[in-house]
Image (cartoon, helix red, strand yellow):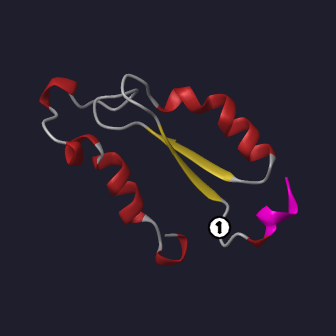
Amino acid sequence: APEIFDSLETKKIVLIHGEGFGAWCWFKSIALLEEAGFLPIALDLAGSGTNGTDANSITSLSEYAKPLTDYLCSLPENEK
């Protein structure tokens, strides 16, 4: 990985898919990021991928993004 990445405070990268996809769409990128020394995580948003929420019951962007906001809120302060 380029030396510029050595100065980053964290190596964690959160990957979010687009509509109609799931965390699975990042599998190639995750491998490359890990190889470069990063700590990638890919999340399934509500109603996507392995998330069990019924997509027809999601009525707002905040409901759709709830898995992401829950994950970000659960991070320790020094990782936010």
Residue 49 in picture, x, y percent from top left: 40, 26
44 in relation to 62, above or below: above
| Location of residue 22 (image quadrant) | top left
Q: Is residue 29 left or right of residue 67?
A: right
Taking the spot 86% from the left edge, 56% from the top edge, the residue there is 2
Q: Is residue 15 left or right of residue 54?
A: right
Residue 76 in picture, x, y percent from top left: 47, 72
Magenta extent: 1-6
6 in relation to 22, above or below: below
Which residue is label 1 attached to? 10
Residue 77 in picture, x, y percent from top left: 47, 77
**Tag count in the figure?**
1
Q: What is the crowding at mark 1: few (fewer than 14 residues within 10 Å), some, or many (at least 20)? A: few
Taking the spot 74% from the left edge, 46% from the top edge, the residue there is 34
Q: Amino acid at mark 1?
A: Thr
Q: Is residue 28 left or right of residue 26?
A: right
Q: Identify which residue, 39 or 9, lies in the foreground.
A: 9
Residue lying at the far bottom of the rendered structure = 78
| Location of residue 61 (image quadrant) | top left
Q: Is residue 40 left or right of residue 14?
A: right
Is 62 contained in the magenta span? Answer: no
Q: Main secondary structure of the magenta part?
A: helix
| Location of residue 45 (image quadrant) | top left
Taking the spot 56% from the left edge, 46% from the top edge, the residue there is 41
Q: Secondary structure at mark 1?
A: loop
21 in relation to 14, above or below: above
Taking the spot 45% from the left edge, 66% from the top edge, the residue there is 75
